[in-house]
Amino acid sequence: MNAPLETLINQLEQVKRTGKGRYIACCPAHGDKHPSLAIRETDDGVVLLHCFAGCDIASVIGALGMDLSDLYPKNTALNSKQEKRPFNASHLLILAAWESLLASIIACDISKGKLKDKDRLLVAAGRLQEIAEVANVN
Ligand SMILES: [Zn+2]
């Protein structure tokens, strides 16, 4: 069976490796001509995705006929019958760090007079709220 990263990468276009376990590709969920989908594989084989155009993860993997569990190796918690928690604390922290970085980049752009990403800043704020809620449930 293929690893989640390999399964995903094989279905994406204009895939470029940007570092260890890091790639960028065209997002399948919107009319992406220049790669805006960042892909990261964690040390335990979980695939994290982020579309810089603002597509949510469900839309991105849904466009490929995949679902959230396909981003996890088959032997991880999400895919075992005993454990149904979709994210552990380290994944939540990685997501929070990513959204925070993105928010800071957008804030810098806005301070330079580029206002086009204001809506994405609100998405980042919303995602940070969701992360906090999920962390609270866990
Ligand atoms: Zn997208």
Image (spheres, rainbow, N blue to C red):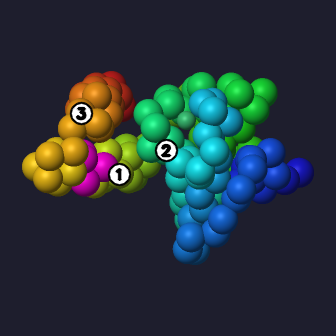
Q: Main secondary structure of the magenta part?
A: helix
Residue lying furthest right in this view?
1
- Check if residue 103 falls in the magenta segment: yes
Per the rendered image, the range of residues in magenta is 102-106
**Which of the pair 1/109 is nearer the observer?**
109
Identify which residue is drawn at 67% across, 36% down.
28
Looking at the rendered structure, which numbered label has been put on residue 98? 1
Amino acid type of disc 2? His
Q: Is residue 134 left or right of residue 107?
A: right
Residue visible at 10% across and 49% down in the picture: 111
> What separation in Å lies between label 1 and label 2 (alpha carbons)?
9 Å
**Residue under pointer 3:** 118
Q: Earlier in the sequence, mark 2 or mark 3?
A: 2
Mark 1 and mark 2 lie on one chain; the one further toward the N terminus is: 2
Q: Is residue 34 above or below residue 85?
A: below
Where on the image, by quarter, is ligand 1? top right
Q: Is residue 66 left or right of residue 129?
A: right
Does the residue at mark 1 contact the one at mark 2 (Cβ under 8 Å)?
A: yes
User: Circle 1 sits in a helix, a strand or a loop, which is it?
Assistant: helix
Q: Secondary structure at mark 3?
A: helix
Q: Label 3: how many residues lie within 10 Å, few (<14), some (14-19) or many (20+)?
A: some
Query: What label does residue 50 carry, if any?
Result: 2
N-term-proximal mark, 3 vs 1: 1
Q: Which mark's residue is nearer the viewer, 3 or 1?
A: 3
Residue 127 image position (x, y, % from top left): 32, 31
